Amino acid sequence: MKRFVVFFALALMLVGVLAVHAQDPVELRITWYDDGNEGTVLRDILDRFEAENPDIRVVVDTVAYNTILEQLPLQVEAGEGPDMARVTNFDAFKGFYLDLRSYLEDTDYWEASFAPAVLAALRSGEDDADALYGFPNQFTVTGPYINRTLFEQAGIDVPSDSMDAVTWEEWTDAAKQVAEATGTQYAIAMDRSGHRFAGPAFSEGAILFADDGSVTIDTPGFRTMAELFVQWHTEGITPAEVWIGSGGSYAAAADYFINGQLVMYMAGSWQIGRFANDIGDAFDWEAVPNPSGPGGSTGMPGGTMMVAFAETEHPAEVARVMDYLVQVDNLKEFTERTLFIPAHLGLGELNFQTDVVAAQNALNVFAAEVPKLSDQAYELQFGGKAFAINNPIRDRLTQVLTGELSLEDALARAQQDVDDALAAASQ
Amino acid sequence: MRTVLSFLTRTRGSKRLHITDLLTYAYLLLGTVIMFGPVIWLVMSSFKPQAELVRFPPRFLPYRQETATVVGYDEPLQLFTVTMEDGTTRTLAQVRRVGIEAQMIDPASPDEIIRVNINQRTPVEEVYFGLENYTEGINRFNFWQYFRNSLVVTIASTLLTLLINSMAAFALSKYKFRGRDAVLMITISTLMVPVSVILIPVFLVITEVGWNNNLLGIIVPAAATPTGVFLLRQYMLTIPDELLDSARIDGASEWRIYLQIILPLARPALAVLAIFSVMWRWNDFLWPLIVLSRSELFTLQVGLNSFQGELQVQWNLILAMTVLTLLPITFVFAFLQRYITTGIATTGMK
Amino acid sequence: MATNSALQRRNKRAPGILQMVLSPVVSLLSALFQGVIYIIDFVMKPLQDRLGVRGMAYVFVLPNLLIFGIFILLPMLLNFYYAFTGGTQLFPQNRPFVGLDNLTTLFTCDNFLDPNSCRDDLFWRAVFNTLGYVTLQVGTMVVLSLITAMVLNAKIVARGFFRSVFFYPVLLSPVVVALIWKWILQQNGLLNGLLVSLGGESVSFLTNAAWAQTWVIVISVWAQMGFFTLILLAGLQSIPGEYYEAAAIDGASRWQSFRSVTLPLLMPTMLVVLVLALIRAVQVFDQVFPFTGGGPGTATQYMVQYIYQTGFANQTKEYGLAAAASLVMAMFLLILTTLQLRLGRSSDAA
């Protein structure tokens, strides 16, 4: 009897093992984070892929954005990473990307579809000048939003209605008057991020990168914007919690804007979906062109890339997934449903899936910002030093706002932080 | 009723309420408000929609705007109380808003459009404990999977903790052996360096052991708690050695002594450690975060963290899911609080 | 009275049913336990015969020590090695050895009292913030825990309930505690809502350095006090009542009997509380980081956060510098604890 039971159990296990192996598809992993509905859209597209390719199963691991920044580089370096990931710090993984070229059928399509500078951002520049490591699945541009209803209630003209080039100083004054006239809590605000600050600083004439590639924080243009920004805080026209109250991390001022407590809000194209949902018809909101200055009128490019890692055991399958995702139809669906600015150059006429007219308009405004982006802005975002520069600027400027450092000292400290970080990275 | 009253007014033997009694109860009441108030506020907030969450000044109860279904309109329309130009107020439904003007209709006579300045209307609201945050959170969040992982980790790790900590405590309290002081020192030294400081080497070790993305990587390393060893050792020191000696004379092996004499006698201390261990493991965050990267293995705390995007943080969902993670531990506490509070007292954590 | 006895009857019956259902389960479990003991005994007996009674102590300590060694001690040693290496590589063998460079970087200061004059200003800000926090937090917590323990030790109604009230926050995870209080203290939060509706001005609790530092202390006391209160309560309850009676016969006032009976007899317990509170205070991080993120500016950035950010969260991960800072912190803790134990011992002797 006993022997029979043992035999039976063993047989069962054997059948189980065989059954599993017979139809076990290759499992691929994507580490992903969500700002809005993009995870849902990705899943829909992957579901279609799986239906067409029953030999591959793709699992999406949604984690916090911080996990992508902090843990993912460790996991990848230790050889424990996923097969693919959505990343924003392109430099953190250099040397660990999978070159997809040998697995792709049509590499020309990839190269023709995306801006060369963006594809190059993943390359380490040693002997991988043509390597294809991934593609941008979201492109963003920074720029300001205004609450038009408040301008109307205050009886003050929106400066950009009548002028082509409005400076940050002029916008600040207008927003201040509107806030005073309407009793609105705050006039102007900017997300807590060095990336957000950079666009206005470049517009004011900051020059971060010299021709020889060296980095200088303290330039007259940078100072002008920093002083204006500090002035927002000393005058109390900006919500202090955003920059001062958020310690060492990114913070958004979006809630104030959504709630009608803020006249002008410097953020970027990624907020459109949220505004369309959360503001509803509470007031009229719109995106306006980036203010102008001696350095032009530039925002910052940004966005995320979908990359593949060389550690994967199934490079060919990874390439199939990636290639599927970049096909015009799929990328188009992704862009239209997520209300992202397309990173693909040839998507043609887009039909964004929103009923909100304001969202459609804002998307057009931001799309028109793309050609105006300056070389310095591109260099900062895609030149390999974005995080090493943006975070010290953010943290040191905050110390000025709290009175811990003078602007003079803060700029010197930021320079030191940047130099240290770049030195450590090259050691 | 009288018994209740006399029970409540029973004081320090004397008939009058002494001033210290008043102070004592004032302190206790204030303490209750301060200790529970913040948690109750969290629970209230978890029912509010995103827009209500950023409202100032905040309101204690969750509200939502009332709506009315009007003939000729597919969607329910939002209701407002409108102050008309003649000073009267009416309840109207809003069709749409254009600029600073709202187009509204009376639900009773839906044909006539009334144009109102948006400052003349205030929303009609009702108290509403909406479960939307909870249902959306659970749907988006894979709640039950994470719950199961948390449960597995908590239970397995607690059982392992009880076993190996009590074994070590038994050895450290009832034997004199070479290296005993060294073991004690090592145990103490682990109190000095928190995990957050040695994350990188911990990650390396876990990777070398091969426990990345494996629940064992959370269960086993966490089981050897220094606090548990000390607590049990302290308690076992009070168990008389004669019990052990007489058992040895009867021919019992050391393992039999441990299992049949020490463990049953140390039950109160084991209960306290069990409760602490459940609490620690349920709340663990940093360690699981570095060990786990595959979502099917996430514990509740790690899963909860994934609501934080780069550019958006979904507060309404975070609040609702936080309340859900609090529920089990609150229930455990409600049922076992007697053991916790008296247990710590009797085990003499000193 | 009648309802009372009915209640008692019901209470008596309930366990009866429970017992009937559970008794087979219990006897099955105990039979199982006996079986397990038998098996373990069978396996371990030969081992004990080989190693001797004393040798078994090592067997008992082994599992706990093994886990400690692999998952805590080994990372600590690795961390020690990291402290003398540079670069951003993860694997120790790939990292360049730089000797004392990291420590030199930390200790380069024109004036050690002015963080702005230091090469690494953030480290010194963290050191000074930690010193301030430790002093105030430990002091406040010990005093409040003692008061609460004494109140709970008095003859009060519903003592069990109040004990658990003060203990409840101990169960909450640090992340949740931070979330709850952030929700209350932010500019548009509950507390400012209350202030404004009472006619006051709203206060920037989290953007003003002094306020933020204060609230960080308040919150940590809120979250940890229950634990220390219970330990002190246990200490209070172990003081024999006769001592107080004797003091009362001598005509001592309440204050006098507190000073001459309670305090000296509570000293050993107090020492445990002090050492534990101190270790936790120096390691402050888990709650503060999600609460203020170290802000405003760097006002609530403490040593562990500095280490965490330098070695882990920053995009250029300077593990070497972080590890060096963690060595400094460990030394600091070691000195503080020994000093305290010394002081405790000498005051015991006096």
Image (spheres, rainbow, N blue to C red):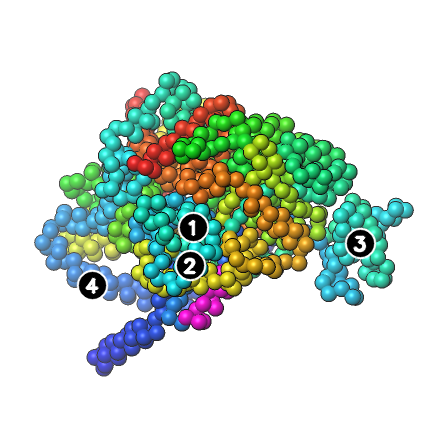
Q: Which mark is residue A119?
A: 1
Q: CA distance from mark 2 to mark 4?
A: 69 Å
Q: CA distance from mark 3 to mark 1?
A: 50 Å
Q: Three-letter amino acid code at disc 4?
A: Ile
Q: Which mark is residue A108?
A: 2
Q: Which residue is mark 4?
A: C39
Image point (29%, 75%), residue name? A18
Judged left or right of residue C44, residue B236 is right
**Mark 1 crowd level (few <14, some 14–19, many ≥20, 10 Å Cα):** many
- What kind of element bears circle 4? helix
- What kind of element bears circle 2? helix
Q: Earlier along the polypeptide chain: callout 1 or callout 2?
A: 2
Q: Can marks 3 and 2 be said to lie on one chain?
A: no
Residue A310 seen in render:
yes
- Position in image of residue A371 (x %, y %): 56, 45
**Circle nearer the viewer, 2 or 4:** 2
Q: Which mark is residue B103?
A: 3
Q: Can marks 2 and 4 be said to lie on one chain?
A: no
Q: Three-letter amino acid code at disc 1?
A: Leu
Q: Which residues are magenta?
A: A42-53
Residue A37 seen in render:
no
Image point (45%, 47%), residue name? A117
- Evaluate if marks 1 and 4 touch, with contact meaning CB atoms under 8 Å apart: no
**Circle nearer the viewer, 3 or 4:** 3
Q: CA distance from mark 3 to mark 4?
A: 82 Å
Would you place residue A423 above or below residue A129 in this image?
A: above
- What kind of element bears circle 1? helix
- Position in image of residue A183 (x %, y %): 73, 36
Would you place residue C159 above or below residue A53 in this image?
A: above
Image point (29%, 43%), residue name? C90
